[in-house]
């Protein structure tokens, strides 16, 4: 079986930051799409997607803060 290499805290932080950047870019693109929404249905769908992205971004930010705190206390 193939064993995956465990990531160091630094590598994990780098991955989290990269993912957060990607999520933020998507979130901002959805804002642009919201401006051009044709009807209320489309607007509602875009708002739902943005809410989900916001939750993911907040959760990721919490993980980053937690890892940063752990790393600085070590």
Image (cartoon, rainbow, N blue to C red):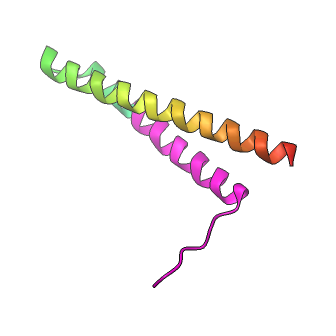
Q: Which of the 4 quarters of the picture holds residue 37?
A: top left
In the rendered image of this protein, does residue 13 appear above or below residue 25?
Answer: below
- Assign the magenta stretch its main secondary structure: helix
Where 68 sits versus 5, above or below?
above
Task: Pick out the residue farthest to the top.
Answer: 40
Residue at image location 24% in from the left, 22% down from the top: 36
Q: Position of residue 58 (x, y in %)?
A: 53, 30
The foreground one among 68 and 53 is 68
Question: Quadrant of residue 60 in the image?
Answer: top right
Look at 61% across and 33% down and name the residue there.
62
Instruction: Give left or right: position of 13 versus 54.
Output: right
**Spot occupied by residue 69 in the image (x, y as percentages of width and height):** 77, 39
> Residue 51: where, in percent of width, then height?
36, 24
Q: Nearer the viewer, residue 1 or 7?
A: 1
Residue 53, magenta (yes or no)? no
Q: What stretch is highlighted in magenta?
A: 1-28
């Amino acid at each position: 079986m193939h064993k995956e290499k465990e990531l160091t805290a630094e590598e994990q932080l780098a991955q989290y930051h990269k993912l957060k950047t990607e999520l933020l870019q998507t979130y901002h693109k959805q804002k642009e799409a919201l401006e051009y929404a044709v009807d209320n249905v489309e607007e509602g769908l875009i708002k739902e997607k943005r809410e989900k992205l916001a939750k993911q971004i907040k959760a990721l930010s919490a993980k980053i803060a937690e890892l940063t705190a752990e790393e600085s206390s070590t």
